[in-house]
């Protein structure tokens, strides 16, 4: 009996002694709690109130931190890094804090992302699904604390999609409301923001004329009336370094937008429809109509018209075989203008009177001009021009003459037809045509006049610009 009693005590004592090391519920060991690293993401669309000590971002973060504390038994631990995007719309993923969050997720630094509401992470269904796919790829759980679900459960995923659909619907309705407001304001002629046109500045959300820039705009419109070419005008403006309010050179593309901007005649445009604007106009309606009468004509037709109005630059200089003068003439066929130089002998005696009856004006003028250009760059012509120029101006150097003649190549295309004809007349004494070639005789005494004309033409072009 005593031995049995001692044995019982021994067993009882062993059971009591093990109580500090083993659970009492049927002897099953409790698994250790896994530590879950939690990040809080906050966002606010507008910047209003962000400078306050306790703002919307702080309120979101405080609520999320309290939720994490309540789940401490589940192993939830707040990471020290803050991911706050203030004053940034949820319709874009271009957010600094969100990018940092995604980088940390890819680096495996986080296990869970908490937000106050789903739309704090994104208002776009497509963007949100992309983010969730990124989270799933790194086994990161997404939790919205006020909507009581997370992405670990199928029901949470279903509710997530439903709420996102409503969020996107709300965003689209808000966008439509804003678009309607903008349209109504534009119909009243109000300035609704955007790129401020050159010639104006914005004060109290209204367009006010900037005097210096407005004068530049008027000068551009008037110059276009003279040149009738956006290409030539853009070339002048780029050479002068002219820019718009944002530092963009007034090249051909920018120039066309400027010439077509109806804000300069005091109108407000919304989706192609013009309304009377609240601002003052810079360009008079008459000048606007004159410019746009030119713009409506295609560049090819404008170039053809300029060629048709150009004087016959070889008139009085061109002679056929036997010394008979060749006179300019033209004809129209199917609405197109064709220019020629025709032999006076043919006009008087018939087509068999001269072996060179007529030549296309554009072709013979091009050949003559090309040969003159090549002659002007030859050393002999440079020296002769310099010596002739020194008779009236001892200070002219050979380099001055050479530079002026070299600049003749790009300058020629910008000269008015009348100036081109005068330069040819000054330089060329006679052009003789034969069935086998062409002979050009230059005026020796015209070299000085050419040099002076080139300088004068360059100066006049700069003054006009």
Image: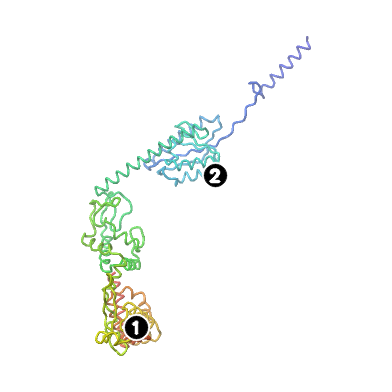
Identify the residue under disc 2. Answer: 106
Camera-side mark, 1 or 2: 2
Where 77 falls versus 446 (above or below)?
above
- Which residue is painted at 49% across and 36% down in the image? 114
Q: Quadrant of residue 90?
A: top left
Q: Residue furthest bottom?
A: 322
Residue nearest the viewer, comparing 383 with 13? 383
Q: Tell me, what colour scheme is on the image?
A: rainbow
Mark 1 residue crowding within 10 angstroms, few (<14) / some (14–19) / many (20+): some
Task: Give the total number of marks visible in the rendering.
Answer: 2
Task: Residue 241 in the image: state x and y as whole percent.
Answer: 35, 65
Coordinates of residue 318 in the picture (x, y in percent): 30, 84
Expressed as whole percent of the image width and height from the top left, the position of residue 314 reads 29, 81
Q: Residue furthest top?
A: 1
Q: Examine the rendered structure and indicate whether residue 285 appears above or below residue 73.
A: below
Would residue 206 appear left or right of 386 to someone viewing this image?
A: left
Rendered view: 256 above or below 425: above
Q: Point out residue 151 in the picture as x, y percentages from the top left corner.
A: 51, 35
User: Callout 2: 10 Å neighbours few (<14), some, many (20+)?
Assistant: some
For mark 1, give the secondary structure.
loop
Labelled disc at residue 357: none
For label 1, the residue is 396
Is 248 placed left or right of 215 in the picture? right
Callout 2 secondary element:
helix
**Toward which corner of the image does residue 300 lie, by quadrant?**
bottom left
């Amino acid at each position: 009996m005593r031995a049995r009693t001692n044995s019982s005590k021994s067993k009882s004592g062993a059971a009591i002694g093990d109580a500090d090391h083993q659970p009492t519920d049927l002897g099953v060991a409790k698994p250790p709690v896994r530590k879950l690293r939690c990040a809080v993401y906050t966002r606010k669309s507008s910047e209003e109130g962000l400078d306050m000590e306790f703002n919307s971002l702080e309120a979101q973060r405080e609520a999320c931190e309290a939720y994490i504390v309540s789940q401490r038994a589940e192993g939830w631990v707040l990471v020290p890094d803050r991911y706050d995007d203030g004053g940034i719309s949820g319709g874009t993923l271009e957010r600094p804090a969100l990018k940092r969050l995604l980088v940390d997720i890819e680096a495996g630094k986080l296990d869970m992302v908490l937000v106050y509401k789903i739309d704090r992470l994104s208002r776009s269904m497509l963007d949100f699904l992309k983010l969730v796919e990124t989270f799933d790829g790194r086994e990161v759980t997404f939790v919205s604390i006020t909507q009581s679900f997370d992405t670990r459960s199928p029901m949470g995923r279903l509710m997530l999609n439903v709420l996102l659909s409503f969020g996107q619907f709300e965003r689209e309705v808000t966008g439509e409301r804003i678009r309607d407001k903008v349209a109504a304001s534009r119909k009243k002629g109000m300035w609704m923001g955007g790129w401020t046109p050159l010639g104006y500045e914005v004060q109290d959300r209204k367009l006010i004329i900037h005097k210096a820039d407005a004068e530049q705009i008027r000068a551009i419109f008037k110059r276009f009336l003279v040149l009738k070419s956006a290409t030539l005008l853009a070339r002048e403006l780029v050479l002068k370094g002219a820019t718009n309010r944002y530092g963009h050179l007034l090249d051909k593309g920018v120039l066309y937008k400027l010439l077509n901007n109806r804000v300069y005649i005091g109108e407000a445009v919304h989706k192609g429809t013009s309304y009377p604007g609240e601002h003052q106009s810079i360009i008079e309606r008459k000048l606007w109509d004159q410019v746009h009468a030119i713009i409506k004509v295609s560049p090819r037709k404008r170039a053809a018209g300029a060629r048709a109005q150009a004087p016959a630059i070889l008139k009085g200089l061109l002679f056929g075989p036997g010394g008979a003068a060749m006179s300019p003439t033209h004809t129209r066929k199917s609405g197109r203008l064709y220019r020629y130089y025709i032999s006076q002998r043919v006009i008087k005696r018939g087509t068999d009177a001269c072996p060179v009856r007529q030549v296309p004006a554009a072709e013979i003028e091009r050949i003559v001009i090309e040969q003159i250009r090549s002659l002007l760059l030859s050393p002999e012509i440079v020296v002769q021009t310099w010596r002739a120029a020194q008779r009236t101006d001892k200070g002219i150097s050979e380099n001055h003459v050479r530079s002026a003649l070299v600049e003749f190549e790009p300058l020629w295309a910008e000269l008015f037809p009348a100036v081109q004809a005068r330069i040819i007349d000054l330089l060329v004494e006679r052009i003789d045509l034969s069935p086998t070639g062409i002979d050009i005789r230059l005026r020796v005494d015209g070299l000085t006049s050419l040099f002076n004309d080139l300088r004068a033409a360059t100066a006049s072009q700069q003054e006009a610009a």
